[in-house]
Amino acid sequence: MIRRLGPCRFLAVALSFGFLGAGAPAAHAEMDLFSRRAFAGVVDLRLATADGEKTFVDGGFGKLRYGGDRSGDWRVKAQVADVALIWKPQFSGAFSGLVDVEAQPEQRPSPDLVQSFVVFKPVPKSDFRYSARAGLYWPEISLEHGGPAWTVAETITPSAINAWVGEEVKVLGAEAHVQNRFGGHEIGLTAGVFTDDDTSGTLLSFRGWALHDIKSTAADRFPLPTLSPYMRTKQAPDTRSRRELDNEAGWYARLEWRPPAPFSLNAFYYDNRGDGVSVINKQWSWDTKFWNFGAAARVGDKLHLSSQLMFGRTIMGFPSATGRWVDMKFASAYLLATREIGEDSVSGRFDWFETKDLTTPQDNANEDGWSALAAYRHRLNEHLNLFVEATHIESARPGRLYGAVPAEQNQNQLQASLRISF
Amino acid sequence: MKAQLAILSAIALLVALSPGARAADLTVSVRTAAGKPVADAVIMVYPQAGGAPRPSGTYRMTQHHMMFDPFVMVAPVGAEVSFPNLDTVRHHVYSFSPTKPFELKLYAKGEAPSVKMDKAGIVALGCNIHDAMVAFIRVVDTAYAAKTDAQGKATIHDLPGGVASLRVWHPYSKAKAGETARAINLARDGAAAEGFTLELRAAPEMKHY
């Protein structure tokens, strides 16, 4: 019954937690469900041009949101890249919620639910503090996303790591967080359990890493590029972002250290505990595990550096003479430098990414590549930020040959984005 | 009546001429060991002659662009500090410092709840919605206190002459309780200068969004 509710299920779970919170003894003055301040939004007006291969959005192997025309020449696109409406109800001083519905032109259905969760976060009475969250959300992995609609703070396009997090690492789960301070050192620990992330690994295996700002939604499907003849009969031509197929809950944990110095470090581990073989409508349960390490530092007053390193392994399919159908290691890292210039900022990022196929050559998922990005953010006023961004990406992927595309590809993309927040 | 007036005048004259009764200005300069000026250090002078603070004026700890402003505020005991929210988002300001534990539950732009600082000490501020927001109020029980500027300097005017205790506090000072103290002997009038070298730990890295 609950499964048939589809996306409504996420909303229902989150809200039921929320109203439980609202039912707790709370001062009514703190409750704010429907005032103007309980609503926020983001509109992203985009002008983009790119050359090179067809974007994955259109079923190609292209790793960027935009791609070139049929002959690989520059193609210009103007679009409303995102419209997000966010409801931030406050049930009591400690209980709040967030429901984020977004219209992204590449997604179907659109608009759709993107995030829906409740947070219990009492005001700390000492250096020890705790909080909890439940619903549909992204675990805290990205050092780039910060806005209420999970927008990237200083660039348009997130790193390869966090673009994949945006696609395949959103969970329907519950997490608890504790932190304490010891002589100026702050240690935080988060642990969560989740369902509905069994297909995590599909895009990473069949398309590979990508750099874009399209977010997965509750009921969406991402197109897959042309599959190998070996996989074509097994896997659907698209992947559902949210599915629970084997009825096994996954888990994750995160440890963070903030010393009395201008840097912080964190380590994150994820295991969706997929069985690799449960399948409905050619949507498979993947067994995906990864580590993510993050570091953020400030150099002087104006320069911020952040970096993430992710590596893991994903496995799918039945055992065969040559191993499982897909057994792939993946790794990526980036270094982002942002310099504040008054209320504006200029950023540069270098991404490196790789996948290593451990099974038969019948389905080649090997890939390696890198990307360099430069972005400028100009703050026009409280509600308007203008971003301009240039990206260059080079990658080699033998699997492109399944779609009759040369394995090695270079691509350039220029974007301007007017981000309106209200 | 005339005799009483004469006695009072004589007492007034004696007080005025006695050592330590005249006013002096003290400029304190605070630097790191590397010679970099230290802003936001709170200078407190406790003259032997005493001098309780008299709250006057307004004390505003604003929230703007998801930050507290000022980062460090000096407020005398008894001061009513207001917390105006200039952001479009709601803030939930709190402190669990023993000096003044309080909580200003979610309030919006245009609202400015206030808290009376009734005890001397340090009040570390946070926002329960925005963890990166940090600020400090140093509540002082002396009339002679000031905060260093960007040049690392602060001047305290009209100090009584004589022996005094001079204290310097900074939220990131590595000294015990963040405070360094020394005894000084102020001349009856004129200008005096003192210098401090503080060892500071770096401000923690906060998410800058």
Image (cartoon, coloured by chain):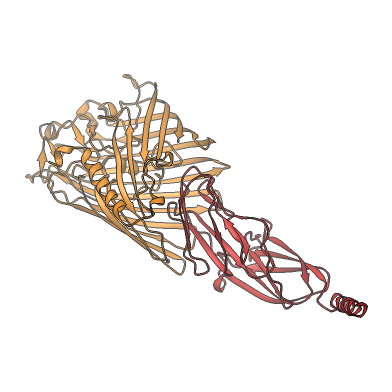
Chain colours: A orange, B red
Judge from the rendering whether residue B197 lies leftward or rightward of residue A265; answer left or right: right
> In front: A226, or A146?
A146
Q: At which x and y percent is residue A27?
A: 38, 54
> In front: A386, or B95?
B95
Q: Using the rendered image of the protein, determine whether residue A295 is visible from the camera's viewpoint.
A: yes
Q: How many marks?
A: 0
Q: In this view, does B154 lie above or below B166?
A: above
Judge from the rendering whether residue B113 lies leftward or rightward of residue A367; answer left or right: right
Residue at horizontal 17%, vertical 46%? A315
> In front: B112, or A225?
B112
Q: Which image quarter is the N terminus of chain A in?
A: top left
Q: At which x and y percent is residue A291?
A: 29, 53
> In front: A241, or B158?
B158
Q: At which x and y percent is residue B127?
A: 46, 55
Q: Which residue lies furthest to the front in this view?
A: B1
Residue at horizontal 65%, vertical 68%? B197
Q: At which x and y percent is residue B78?
A: 61, 65
Residue A161 placement: quadrant: top left
Residue A204 placement: quadrant: top left
Residue at horizontal 52%, vertical 48%? B111
Q: In this view, does B27 lie above or below A153?
A: below
Q: Using the rendered image of the protein, determine whether residue A241 is visible from the camera's viewpoint.
A: no
Q: Which image quarter is the C terminus of chain A in?
A: top left
